[in-house]
């Protein structure tokens, strides 16, 4: 198998599994229990928190563990909405967010909040002036993703953070696709709230975190115990937390080197695909992107058929978000960038990772070229 779908998930790094094992076997105590057997476990959780904070450039107590990037997004957005409703009822986001953000905003609209969904340009970038124009006295939150999961396009989050700070508005960014993938600490985004998730950075599934800037008022989403300073009730996923910290520090250690390597592989893939296959469009290429991602539209071919065709060659890619697989609708991200429904339906996402080598790119190009040719022949009959 050649796995080229790292934006959907990544394999667990064996060093991460090794770090987690003691907390499945001997050290299985509840970190909230008072005896020494559990103290060891509590210490492991706090050391993991500290390590993640060091990698992110923030304070230890600003990291809150959750179960997923989706939960982190929910906690950030719902948490601000509930706490600050008396100050205002308006939220600003973009049309290209992950469904974890979009559907949370839609649910809040049903509760009476007003939400502005900002457009993006043809490169997939939100315009800072549009953000500025959208802010009204009742705006309590701006939530704009760091990098898009389908195109890899990086948004101008530092500028948005400055703008929001100037107006006294909270800013959340979904950094699920950038944490450990770009050689900058997460907090350099300047956001007040930052979501990230273990399984996108060679850590386990079912563990994630939310950075919550000191003094940010946030209501919990879950009711229950007082874990995570009252922000996230429920017994901690200790092995997952230890694994997230190990995965995060490994990712940060190699991020500079990997950035250069993956960008070279991705650029090579794109230029060769464009020279071998006709009528291909690379989406988001005019904007800064995370280095592992490419999104390609092929004329007169269905993206889902390309994915199935490549699967027959043992190659895993996708049409976009793994959460949207099986959805008959074309990608909301590509439509927002101005692609026609047909162009959007003819698109695929290839996302490279740590194990990707030049031979994998060669094999993918060969399989892609054969598959597109075959599908175009069938569709022209
Ligand atoms: N946000 C983005 C940008 C994502 O790509 C994903 C997952 O693909 C999520 C949020 C959801 O993260 P999780 O799968 O940990 O719930």
Image: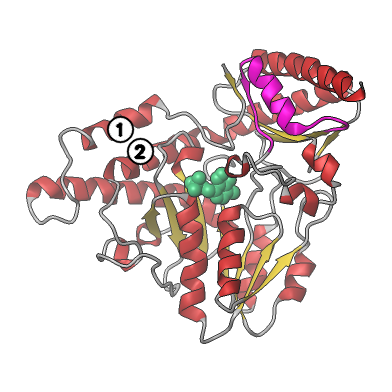
Q: Which mark is residue 243?
A: 2
> Cα distance, mark 1 to mark 2?
6 Å
| Dot 1 or dot 2, earlier in sequence | 1
Q: Is residue 292 left or right of residue 122?
A: left
- Numbered range of the magenta stretch: 298-319
Residue 338 x %, y %: 85, 51
In terms of depth relative to the viewer, which is nearer, 345 or 91? 345
Secondary structure of residue under mark 1: helix
Q: Secondary structure at mark 2?
A: helix
- 331 is within the stretch colored magenta: no
Q: Residue at x 78, y 46 (%)?
A: 287
Q: Residue sitting at 53 percent across and 52 percent down? A: 186
Q: Is residue 190 above or below residue 206?
A: below
- The vertical placement of 369 against 123, above or below, is above
Q: Which mark is residue 19?
A: 1
* Residue at the spot 50% in from the left edge and 80% down from the top edge: 84
Q: Residue at x 78, y 39 (%)?
A: 345
Can you give x and y, in whole percent of width and height, for residue 265 in the image?
70, 24
Disc 1 to disc 2: CB gap under 8 Å: yes
**Is the C terminus in the top left, top right, bottom left or bottom right quadrant?**
top right
The single residue placed furthest to the front in the displayed view is 381
Q: Quadrant of the N terminus?
A: top right
Q: Please give the label number shown on residue 292.
A: none
Other-residue count near label 2 (Cα within 10 Å), few / some / many at <14 / 14–19 / ≥20: many
Determine if the magenta segment contains residue 299: yes
- Looking at the picture, how far across and down is residue 329, in whole percent? 72, 47
Residue placed most toward the observer, 165 or 194: 194
Q: Quadrant of residue 224?
A: bottom left
């Amino acid at each position: 198998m050649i796995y080229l779908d790292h934006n959907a998930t990544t394999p667990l790094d064996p060093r991460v599994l090794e770090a987690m094992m003691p907390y499945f076997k001997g050290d299985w105590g509840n970190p909230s229990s008072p005896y020494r057997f559990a103290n060891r476990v509590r210490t492991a959780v706090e050391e993991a928190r500290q390590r993640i904070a060091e990698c992110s450039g923030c304070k230890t107590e600003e990291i809150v563990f959750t179960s997923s990037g989706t939960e982190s997004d929910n906690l950030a957005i719902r948490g601000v909405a509930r706490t600050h409703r008396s100050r205002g009822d308006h939220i600003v986001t973009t049309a290209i967010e992950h469904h974890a953000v979009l559907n949370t905003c839609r649910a809040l609209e049903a509760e009476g909040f007003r939400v502005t969904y900002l457009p993006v340009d043809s490169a997939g970038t939100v315009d800072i002036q549009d953000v500025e124009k959208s802010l009204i006295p009742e705006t309590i939150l701006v939530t704009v993703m760091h990098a898009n999961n389908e195109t890899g396009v990086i948004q101008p989050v530092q500028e948005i953070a400055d703008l929001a700070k100037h107006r006294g508005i909270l800013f959340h960014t979904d950094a699920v696709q950038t944490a450990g993938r770009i050689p900058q600490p997460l907090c350099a985004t300047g956001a007040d709230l930052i979501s990230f998730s273990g399984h996108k950075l060679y850590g386990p599934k079912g563990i994630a975190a939310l950075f919550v800037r000191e003094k940010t008022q946030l209501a919990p989403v879950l009711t229950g115990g007082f874990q995570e300073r009252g922000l996230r009730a429920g017994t901690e996923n200790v092995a997952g937390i230890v694994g997230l910290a190990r995965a995060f520090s490994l990712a940060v250690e190699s991020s500079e080197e990997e950035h250069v390597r993956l960008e070279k592989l991705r650029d090579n893939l794109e230029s060769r695909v464009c020279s071998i296959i006709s009528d291909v469009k690379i989406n988001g290429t005019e904007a800064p992107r995370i280095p592992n991602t490419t999104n390609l539209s092929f004329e007169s071919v269905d993206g889902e058929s390309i994915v199935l065709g490549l699967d027959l060659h043992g190659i895993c890619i996708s049409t976009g978000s793994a959460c949207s697989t099986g959805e008959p609708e074309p990608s909301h991200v590509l439509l927002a960038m101005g692609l026609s429904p047909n162009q959007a339906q003819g698109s695929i996402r290839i996302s490279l990772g740590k194990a990707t080598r030049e031979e994998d790119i060669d094999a993918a190009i060969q399989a892609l070229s054969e598959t597109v040719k075959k599908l175009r022949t069938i569709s022209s009959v």
